[in-house]
């Protein structure tokens, strides 16, 4: 292979560049990214960066030396609009193209929004650095009343950050017990209780009917969130954290299978052996993993298979994900089902510090979860989930 184009300039794209060089690829490596900023890390955007404890210069995924070592040709602010697989090129919005005999698709996802709210002042999503800059600014304008739609990890992190800034926060979620479908009821309860313990109001089983707005300049500004029961929660700032949509539109007509992501086998190889997909956009063996760690795990395997010309190795996802809320580290590894048995092996959920082990019907450990105890989490993860941790 002479040239490999990596499309997407975030963690999956950067880890792919590192993995390709690490595996000995010494041809031309072009990274196409539609974000104008140099590759940056997203996890701090809802945590230290939002609160003001980390500056933009701490977010970079590559420093100048690392970039030089990778001999990476970066095309930033460049949007891929088409993959011409037969012609061996990635077509860009500016009419140019990148000829490549191998392609890594790492276009991730974009934040889902509430319909019809794109132009409403005061309504925020949080996916990009520009989103985080805008939200950070808004949280500092007076003492805004914040309403967060969605009590997943990102919504919970934003709530935690807002509380640390002394702001009043309400979190709305449609589920009776947020996170329960993923973590099971007992662990989800432990996570959700953190909100009340830190002064965040959580309204579960709550449907959002629309936004209350007032005219502002040429447009509209949010003043509240209207709920399904007819009531309204007042808001100066609304943050919508209801998941992502994979960025696959540019691949329509490419011949690749697109079903809620780019379909790959367990080795991240698409239906075309010279095209792999990694990160949040990849639907590997029927499942997308929207976690920072899985992007790196997948990149290593994808690089090896791309250079090998076929699937020679497959990903063993660790399922590792972390979150930081109200001064605590939350960590999960493995692939527990919400119906697995849960044993608290240390601490107690109502103390806000505990470690739990999930086991399936056969008594096999399927996952480990910890709140506020990274040391024991690390030990259990190594001893109880050795395959996944490798
Ligand atoms: C605020 C926030 C906090 C998070 N915190 C955590 C955490 O604590 N723990 C954790 O495990 N995970 C966390 N995550 C998730 C983690 O950051 C993602 O799993 C990770 O960013 C996925 O990386 P990716 O490269 O696959 O996709 P993305 O990060 O979505 O990057 C895809 C890139 O491709 C670009 N792109 C899209 N379409 C095109 C196109 N047509 N042409 C060119 N470029 C294109 C996009 O602009 C983007 O730069 C967090 C995410 C966010 C947003």
Image (spheres, rainbow, N blue to C red):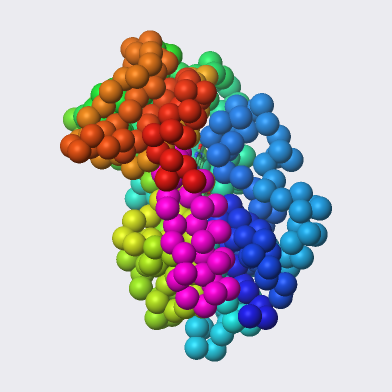
Q: Does residue 19 appear in this view?
A: yes
Residue 41, above or below 286: above
Give the camera-side residue of 258 and 27: 27
For image coordinates 20% across by 38% down, the residue present is 362
Residue 190 in the image, given as x and y percentages of width and height: 33, 20
Residue 359 placement, left or right of 119: left
Figure quadrant of the N terminus: bottom right
Please tell me whether residue 69 belongs to the stretch shown in magenta. Answer: no
Q: Magenta region: which residues?
A: 293-321
Residue 60, above or below 371: below
For image coordinates 51% across by 70% down, the residue present is 305
For image coordinates 48% across by 50% down, the residue present is 294
Residue 241 in the image, given as x and y percentages of width and height: 41, 40
Name, please, the residue furthest toward the bottom: 87
Residue 280 in the image, given as x and y percentages of width and height: 45, 54
Count the marks: 0
Residue 301, above or below 160: below
Residue 369: quadrant of the picture:
top left
């Amino acid at each position: 292979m002479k040239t490999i184009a990596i499309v997407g300039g975030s963690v999956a794209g950067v880890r792919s560049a590192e993995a390709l060089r690490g595996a000995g690829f010494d041809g031309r490596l072009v990274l196409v990214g539609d974000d104008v900023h140099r590759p940056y890390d997203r996890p701090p955007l809802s945590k230290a960066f939002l609160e003001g404890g980390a500056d933009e210069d701490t977010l970079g995924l590559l420093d100048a030396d690392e970039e030089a070592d990778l001999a990476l040709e970066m095309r930033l602010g460049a949007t891929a609009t088409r993959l011409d697989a037969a012609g061996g090129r990635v077509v860009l919005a500016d009419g140019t193209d990148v000829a490549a005999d191998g392609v890594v698709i790492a276009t991730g996802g974009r934040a889902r929004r509430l319909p019809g709210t794109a132009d409403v002042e005061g309504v925020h999503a949080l996916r990009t650095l520009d989103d985080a800059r805008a939200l950070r600014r808004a949280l500092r304008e007076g003492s805004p009343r914040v309403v967060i739609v969605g009590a997943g990890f990102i919504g919970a992190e934003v709530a935690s950050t807002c509380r640390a800034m002394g702001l009043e926060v309400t979190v709305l979620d449609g589920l009776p017990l947020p996170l329960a479908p993923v973590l099971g009821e007992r662990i989800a309860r432990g996570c959700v209780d953190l909100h009340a313990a830190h002064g965040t109001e959580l309204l579960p089983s709550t449907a959002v009917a629309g936004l209350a707005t007032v005219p502002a300049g040429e447009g509209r500004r949010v003043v509240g969130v209207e709920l399904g029961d007819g009531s309204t929660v007042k808001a100066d700032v609304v943050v919508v954290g209801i998941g992502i949509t994979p960025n696959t539109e540019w691949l329509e007509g490419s011949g690749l299978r697109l079903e809620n992501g780019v379909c790959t086998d367990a080795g991240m190889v698409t239906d075309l052996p010279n095209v792999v997909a990694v990160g949040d956009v990849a639907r590997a063996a029927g499942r997308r993993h929207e976690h920072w760690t899985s992007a790196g795990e997948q990149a290593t395997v994808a690089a090896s298979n791309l250079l090998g010309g076929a699937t020679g190795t497959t990903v063993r996802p660790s399922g590792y994900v972390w979150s930081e809320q109200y001064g605590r580290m939350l960590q999960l590894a493995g692939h527990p089902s919400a119906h697995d048995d849960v044993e608290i092996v240390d601490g107690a959920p109502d103390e806000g510090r505990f470690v739990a082990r999930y086991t399936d019907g056969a008594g096999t450990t399927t996952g480990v979860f910890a709140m506020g105890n990274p040391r024991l989490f690390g030990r259990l993860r190594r001893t109880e989930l050795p395959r996944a941790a490798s």
